[in-house]
Amino acid sequence: MRLLLATTAVLLLTFSAGAAMPVRTIASNQKVAASGQPLVLARISSISPNCASVGSSSVQLLGRPAHGQFAVQQIRAQGRYPAGNPRSKCNGRKLPMQQLTYVSTPGYQGPDVVQFQIVYPNGTADRVRIPLLVK
């Protein structure tokens, strides 16, 4: 009886761990920002190969920048997919996107960092860390 209970507990724990959302950690190369000027860090677009939106991603700030502000804006901008991507036929069309922007405190010069998580409509997620050098 104990063995059965122990096996059941392990299966339940394994199932719970397997049900967790897959998260990739992405460490970006350092980006350079002009002091007090907006820097576009990323544009996120979730579209199908026929150019229809499949939903909006959720962006969560994980670490507030010490010397600036992080913003997420809903925009429409042209897609830029590489030639081999099935979504490349959407290039040139204005697509719904989220634009992630950093702006340093005016006059500040030195290092900063932005950390955020993106949860995509399909349930996958990326944790992103972007080191910044403000000049």
Image (cartoon, rainbow, N blue to C red):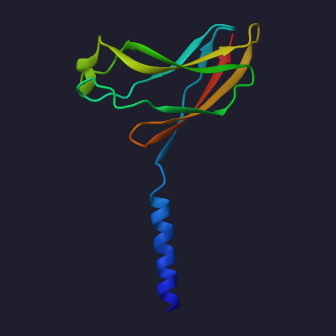
**What residue is rendered at 46% in x and 48% in y?**
22
Quarter occupied by residue 66 = top right
Position of residue 105 measured from the top left corner of the image (x, y, whole percent):
74, 13
Quadrant, the C terminus: top right
**What residue is rendered at 39% in x and 19% in y?**
96
Label count reads 0
Q: In screen coordinates, is 6 left or right of 48?
A: right
Position of residue 61 measured from the top left corner of the image (x, y, whole percent):
62, 32
**What residue is rendered at 50% in x and 61% in y?**
17
Q: Is residue 36 above or below residue 115?
A: above
Position of residue 5 measured from the top left corner of the image (x, y, whole percent):
51, 84
Quarter occupied by residue 79 = top left
**What residue is rendered at 37% in x and 29% in y?**
46
Quarter occupied by residue 91 = top left
Q: Is residue 119 above or below residue 28?
A: below
Position of residue 124 measured from the top left corner of the image (x, y, whole percent):
43, 42
Q: In screen coordinates, is 114 left or right of 20?
A: right
Q: In screen coordinates, is 130 left or right of 81?
A: right
